Amino acid sequence: MNRPLVIGNWKMNLDYVEAVHLIQQLGVVLKNKPLEHVDLVVVPPFVDIRSVTSVVESERVALEVGAQHASVHDAGAHTGEVSVSMLQRLNVTWVLVGHSERRAMYAMTDEVVAQTLRTVVRQGLRAVLCVGEELSVREAQNDRDFVTAQLHAALEGLDEKWRPLVTIAYEPVWAIGTGLTASTEQVREMTEHIRTVAASLSLGDVRVLYGGSVNAENAAALVNEGHVDGFLVGGASL
Ligand code: PEP
């Protein structure tokens, strides 16, 4: 098994005061826990990042800070966007790329996902590539082909030196924020498939996470029977 990784995606929740409160509470909870064998990341809204990293650094909370998205562009006339270098200046070390909510609600195409991933890793940040199918795709039994296509679109031709910076999160769209978790069997089958496709793209030891209504009750079974390297957690991370 790869080194476990758990990422909390706060989405568009918590203003900076609430974010400071939560990260301080997390700091207390994590103190004196045996965390040397696990990576933990929180992913607050952009406007909370500075406050959260200040607490993480001053109180030595054992986690890293990520961003939910980054612009595909390096700088310039892109109103409302945030660049990777701006995130880097805030000590952000991880960026979610192609979360299904960005793909579905903000027209993030496979092509933009691929370019954004390159923009992120070229500057040395870690990219969490999110893939996963809609319910209709699974019902039509096209889920594997769909995820394969997303992986190829994002990772084909990625320079060898950037590959260690990539993590893949399998997030079936029908399980995100719905309370419906994929069964451990469904998760195991898809994570094995993802590992096979990743290996064919020369990303042999990539970490594969699962996301979709993960919580304290179902996490252990998903690790033990789903064979994932960790989780991308939305609602329960709040
Ligand atoms: C997510 O935001 O990536 C996610 C998996 O959300 P939730 O855990 O709420 O389903």
Image (cartoon, grey):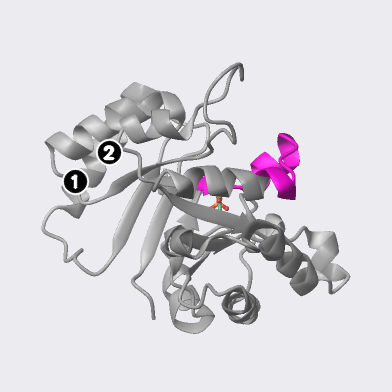
Structural crowding at the residue carrying mark 1, measured as other residues with C-alpha within 10 Å and reported as few (<14), some (14–19) or many (≥20): some
| Residue beneath disc 1 | 61
> What secondary structure is marked by label 2?
helix
- Residue type at mark 1 is Val
Q: Is residue 171 magenta?
A: no
Residue 216 quadrant: bottom left
Compare residues 78 and 167 and report the one nearer the observer. Answer: 78
In which quadrant of the rendered image does the C terminus lie? top left
- Distance of label 2 from label 1 (alpha carbons): 8 Å
Q: Residue at x 73, y 36 (%)?
A: 105
Structural crowding at the residue carrying mark 2, measured as other residues with C-alpha within 10 Å and reported as few (<14), some (14–19) or many (≥20): many
Seen in the picture, residue 44 relative to 133 is either above or below; the reply is above
Residue 51 image offset from top left, x and y in percent: 28, 26
Q: Residue at x 52, y 24 (%)?
A: 75
Residue 19 in view, yes or no: no
Seen in the picture, residue 10 relative to 180 is either above or below; the reply is above
Residue 80 in view, yes or no: yes
Q: Is mark 2 within 8 Å of ligand 1?
A: no
Q: Residue furthest right?
A: 140
Q: Is residue 97 magenta?
A: yes
| Residue beneath disc 2 | 23
Seen in the picture, residue 6 relative to 187 is either above or below; the reply is above
State which region is magenta.
Answer: 96-112
Q: Are marks 2 and 1 in contact (CB under 8 Å)?
A: yes
Residue 119 image offset from top left, x and y in percent: 53, 42
Left or right of residue 222, residue 183 in this image? right
> What secondary structure is marked by label 1?
loop
Seen in the picture, residue 47 relative to 188 is either above or below; the reply is above
**In the rendering, which numbered label is found on residue 34?**
none
- Residue type at mark 2 is Ile
